[in-house]
Image (cartoon, helix red, strand yellow):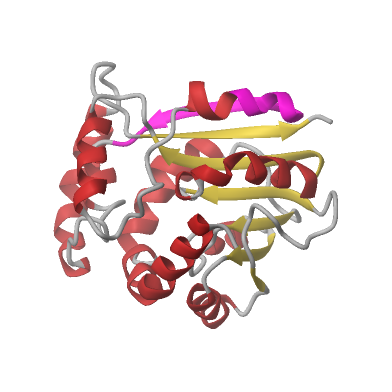
């Protein structure tokens, strides 16, 4: 097993319950609905067979189910798979997204929310595997922290100090790192940039050790600030999301 996979497995086994507590809460779901999911999902998901990949406890699964999708998960952490099964009573496969046991052309869509930057040493294998198991015409949806902003200098410093992050982790450049993979057989259908204050204090509450009980106080003002700042072109955008369609 690749070292990065071993590191991620250990990390998420140890954090599974805490991760679920932080990101299945009401305010994280509100944030993701407004600022991540609404701009990203423009297609009708009803009836689609969707893989929630690198799913943890299924933070995104509830949204996909509410959109009418038939959802299954996959995650490298045994503890995350246990949490997923308790929460959703849906199949969740214990495996790495870079090398699954799914057949070719299995899924109508695959969604990874904030997972690709955790497997950078295996990014090539991961994208090829996603392409393989996605049906022709199917969609690959993803969201990742944005490397192409000056704020990334602070993030890199934070990653080095915080033992929650492994040495292989960093933000991703869409233009330089991910976009070249379109040549595998994808077409870019949408690209969005967002994230500022609420993304930090609500969307990254676990990493910043912000107690979940404070989110109800932080959410209203941080959401307001994020809506205002998102309209200003000079404010750094801390994440990007995109949808790719499999063409060949």
Q: Is residue 55 left or right of residue 22?
A: right
Q: Is residue 77 left or right of residue 139?
A: left
Residue in the picture at 21% in, 53% down:
219
Q: Is residue 200 left or right of residue 141?
A: left
Q: Is residue 30 depicted above or below 192 in this figure?
A: below
Question: Quadrant where the C terminus lies?
Answer: top right
Q: Is residue 166 depicted above or below 91 in this figure?
A: above
Residue 100, x across and y down, in percent = 72, 59
Q: Quadrant of residue 52?
A: bottom right
Residue in the picture at 79% in, 60% down:
102
Residue 152, x across and y down, in percent = 27, 32
Say if the magenta span includes residue 188. yes
Q: Quadrant of residue 205?
A: bottom left
Residue in the picture at 60% in, 36% down:
42
Question: Quadrant where the N terminus lies?
Answer: bottom right
Residue 81, x across and y down, in percent = 55, 75
Front position in the image: 97 or 217: 97
Q: Quadrant of residue 235?
A: top left
Residue span colored magenta:
180-195
Front position in the image: 31 or 147: 147
């Amino acid at each position: 097993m690749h070292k990065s996979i071993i590191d991620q497995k250990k990390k998420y086994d140890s954090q599974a319950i805490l991760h679920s507590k932080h990101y299945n809460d009401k305010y994280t779901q509100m944030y993701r609905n407004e600022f991540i999911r609404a701009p990203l999902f423009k297609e009708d998901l009803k009836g689609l067979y969707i893989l929630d990949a690198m799913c943890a406890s299924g933070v995104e699964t509830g949204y996909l189910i509410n959109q009418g999708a038939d959802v299954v998960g996959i995650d490298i952490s045994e503890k995350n798979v246990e949490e997923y099964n308790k929460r959703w009573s849906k199949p969740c496969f214990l495996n790495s997204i870079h090398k699954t046991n799914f057949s070719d052309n299995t899924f109508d869509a695959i969604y990874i929310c904030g997972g690709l930057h955790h497997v950078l040493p295996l990014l090539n294998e991961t994208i090829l595997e996603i392409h393989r198991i996605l049906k022709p015409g199917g969609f690959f949806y993803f969201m990742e922290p944005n490397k192409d902003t000056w704020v990334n200098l602070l993030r890199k410093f934070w990653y080095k100090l915080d033992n929650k992050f492994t040495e292989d982790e960093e933000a991703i450049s869409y233009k330089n790192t991910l976009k070249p993979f379109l040549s595998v057989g994808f077409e870019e259908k949408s690209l969005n940039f967002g994230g500022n204050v609420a993304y930090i204090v609500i969307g990254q509450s676990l990493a910043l050790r912000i107690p979940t009980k404070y989110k109800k106080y932080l959410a209203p003002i941080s959401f307001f600030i994020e809506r205002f700042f998102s309209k200003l072109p000079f404010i750094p955008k801390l994440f990007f999301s995109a949808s790719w369609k499999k063409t060949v």
